[in-house]
Image: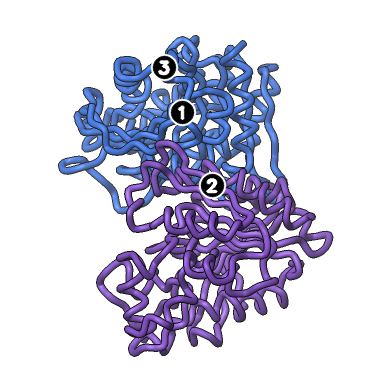
Chain colours: A purple, B blue
Amino acid sequence: METISENRSFGGTQGVYSHQATSTGTQMTFGLFQPAEASDGPVPVLWYLSGLTCTHANAMEKAGAQAWAAEQGIAVVFPDTSPRGEGVPDDEAYDLGQGAGFYIDATQAPWNTHFKMRSYIADDLPTVLSENFALDMDRQAITGHSMGGHGALTLAMGLPGRFRSVSAFAPICNPTQSDWGRKQFAAYLGEEKAHWAAHDATLLMQSKGFDGPILIDTGTNDQFGDLLRTGALAAAIAAKRQDAIMRMQKDYDHSYFFVASFMEDHMNFHAEALYA
Amino acid sequence: METISENRSFGGTQGVYSHQATSTGTQMTFGLFQPAEASDGPVPVLWYLSGLTCTHANAMEKAGAQAWAAEQGIAVVFPDTSPRGEGVPDDEAYDLGQGAGFYIDATQAPWNTHFKMRSYIADDLPTVLSENFALDMDRQAITGHSMGGHGALTLAMGLPGRFRSVSAFAPICNPTQSDWGRKQFAAYLGEEKAHWAAHDATLLMQSKGFDGPILIDTGTNDQFGDLLRTGALAAAIAAKRQDAIMRMQKDYDHSYFFVASFMEDHMNFHAEALYA
């Protein structure tokens, strides 16, 4: 693991690191905020999965998470959204290929050589984190924005026992029924829809649910509202009688201005679960 | 005035606007955060002047000011750092020309056609703001980062009665004695050093001081620490017996991670003066 940069932030350290990942076969970059408490011993960790077109940097710079993470003594990890670099396939569309890994393991060429973002988030990066930092991997929570909200919800339900709480900002809720999902799942996973279900939060809610609390915020003015299919997940949550809070935030849109506005709430929500 | 974008943010509105400026003779873009209270009537306003290479956008996206401005009911204006566009001269160095206006009115060719950033901040933009937004122009404060900290301090001392309080993050304190200053003042104002003194915070502190409180934060690990000449201003403040707090923040550097870490303190500091 290589240190790219470290900046003092809210009494802790905002670092950027890179490492060779087995899953993707590429050099991967991630951000990690460690609160001051990390110098005294392991701290809980919150995963923040980012949305389409983002790298590790966007949320780290714009979501305002550090202020509240420092207050709660929680580390925050900001992974990249796809493999990158020479030899990694891409597509000219913003929503496929680099910057658009969708947190799944591709099985179809040309994507199946490097696009293994689920394994990267579930296996590779946790190993790197636990080997290099004072993180309490028994106390993990996960959140994300848009495509990253999809990632947070599907990973939380797909890895029972891993995360104590899950939240999301304007998540893609039902990708198998959305243009943000069908195209990418077809490309990465093939046309067989049975392979898609494990990566759709609404379908996972119907079949499994989540053993912990859920918090979801979405803006009433979200310019991608139709693509998110928030209502499908809301219905599934109600039917499942899932412990969850879903909020439609009046006049907010899909931007980081929206994310930052509710970051304090999300951090406090996760802190309650992580320190329970 | 034209609206470029408006995003809901912390219960208020983060807008970006552009207008034709008399001073610079160019189309200028600025950001303005209006807290929820602005819909009920005029609110106090804090100016945030940015540093070298920045546009209006950097601090608006990375400084985390909206959270605390919303809490205090204060508007924040984020001006650009120079004129831009076709016909506006530039230099290949990052610290001269576009993105490096230094908040002064150039008198020397080729800069004197458009580089009038002091007049822009002191006269043009206040007019646009008061004509278009619910701002209480009798309650203004000013802050800034690096070159913008220089701008905040020199404008505050140079326009007595305009600003109730001034603060700065890692300001350039003594540009007439620094490579961040001499080169630019020579280019914009000419070699006659008598014309430089009105734009040097340390010299202004020696000659005039400021009729209000000052708060300055600088990181002990600032990579540009030598260029800032913090000590010269500190000595001038002490000699003047100026109402001021200067803090050296252990391990912090020059980045927005540093700025964001202390934004709450600065907002609270200004709120105390604005609501006195």
Mark 2: secondary structure: helix
**Residue A276 versus residue A260 in the image, above or below:** below
Amino acid type, callout 3: Leu
Residue that carries the numbered disc 3 in the rendered image: B135
Mark 3: secondary structure: strand
Residue that carries the numbered disc 1 in the rendered image: B76
Amino acid type, callout 1: Val
Q: For this rendering, which residue is in front, A268 or B141?
A: A268
> x, y (%) of residue A84?
41, 77
Graded by Cα atoms within 10 Å as few (under 14), some (14 to 19) or many (20 or more), the crowding at tag 2 reads many
Quarter location, residue B117: top left
Mark 2 and mark 3 in contact? Answer it, CB < 8 Å: no
Mark 1 and mark 2 in contact? Answer it, CB < 8 Å: no
First along the sequence among labels 1 and 3? 1
Quarter of the figure that contains the N terminus of chain B: top left
Residue B256 - label: 2
Quarter of the figure that contains the C terminus of chain B: top right
Q: For this rendering, which residue is in front, B192 or B233?
A: B233
> x, y (%) of residue A48?
56, 61
First along the sequence among labels 2 and 3? 3
Q: For this rendering, which residue is in front, B221 or A24?
A: A24
Residue under the image location 39 percent in, 44 percent down: A253
